[in-house]
Image (cartoon, rainbow, N blue to C red):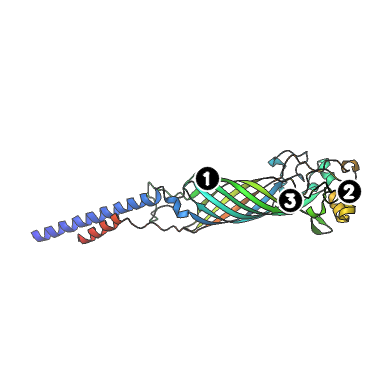
Amino acid sequence: MIFGVNLQCSFMRNLTLFILLICGEFIVAQSTNFNSSNDWMRTQKELVFGFGTSNVLSDLGGLDQIGTDYSFADLETSQFSLSAQAGYRFRFHKNWAYKGALSWVRVKGSDQLTQEPFRNNRNLHFRTDIYELYNGVEWGFSRDRVGHRYGLKGMRGFKNRSSYWYVGTGLGVFWFNPKAQYNGTWTALQPLGTEGQVAADSLKKYSRISVSIPLNAGFRFALGKKITIGLEVSFRKIFTDYLDDVSGDYYDNYLIRQAGGDVAAELADPSSGNFYEWTIQGEQRGDPTTKDAYMSGMLTFGYNLSGFGYRSRTPFQKNRRKRFRASF
């Protein structure tokens, strides 16, 4: 009888220790994996892809009024086009990350879409594909969490918080090639010298390579251990005014025709001629005091290369489990 009582007490003691050990390890695991400063290392390396839309602020098109500097109200909504991105993100700190990306952005504009008299009479239009190589940093002001380790519903204290908000900036180098339609064919404008660059030795062609300073903002959230989805908007401050091939004054169209041919002359001044004095040599064609700008909005997808595996137990935890098993 006494032997039975001792056996029952021993069993209850071991069962109690087992329950306490499991609860203790659960608490330690939750604290270690979701409430420590090393959570961010689980998403340290990530491939990033994006697809979306784009638009431009340039000398062409806009509202039915004289253009203003960097006014988003001057965006022509019918001219939204496409954009795409592929890149790599490396988080070197819980709040900081490096991002490198290759982007393709298409932008376009047309004076036919505005009733402002000068722009409408000018009758210029363009389209350009922009290829940008970007390097920059991001600052995240929220921390990734993917929820409870054991997926227990209703657990209190460690709630699922998988969203991540960030802003970023950096430096980009891009190539662009503005084109206009002539007889149904999109023709590159820079080689034609539409502002007299071919006709006059004193005028040089503008470079189709320039730099940008992107200003980015976005958020993303986890769909699982490997995949994230989010949104990112970006405004590019650039240092060229020839994204649309328009910046300076009109040049003598007769000299442009002699130097570049009929196509160059027609695309330099496709106006109706109703206000002939507005497009003669020396009259304003664009505004060189304000550089162009373009922007994009993308739906982003990320693939985590770091893995979401939970860290193995510490030597102390492993030894504690061995001692517990030996006690049975």
- Quadrant containing the C terminus in the rendered view: bottom left
SS label for mark 1: strand
Determine if residue 239 is in view: yes
Q: Looking at the rendered structure, which numbered label has been put on residue 120?
A: none
Q: What's under tag 3, amino acid-wise?
A: Ser
For discs 2 and 3, the disc positioned in front in the rendered view: 3
Spot occupied by residue 89 in the image (x, y as percentages of width and height): 53, 53
Q: Mark 2–mark 1 contact, CB under 8 Å?
A: no
SS label for mark 2: helix
Within 10 angstroms of label 1, few (less than 14), some, or many (20 or more) residues? some
Spot occupied by residue 278 in the image (x, y as percentages of width and height): 87, 41
For discs 3 and 1, the disc positioned in front in the rendered view: 3
Could you tell me which residue is drawn at 57 percent across and 46 percent down?
168
Q: Which residue is mark 1?
A: 139
Q: Looking at the rendered structure, which numbered label has been put on residue 207?
A: 3
Q: What's under tag 1, amino acid-wise?
A: Trp
Q: Nearer the viewer, residue 31 or 154?
A: 31
Q: From the viewer's perspective, is 7 left or right of 48? A: left
- Quadrant containing the N terminus in the rendered view: bottom left
Q: From the viewer's perspective, is 278 left or right of 43? A: right
Spot occupied by residue 258 in the image (x, y as percentages of width and height): 90, 53
Could you tell me which residue is drawn at 49 percent across and 51 percent down?
91
The answer for how far apart the CA atoms under marks 2 and 1 are is 51 Å
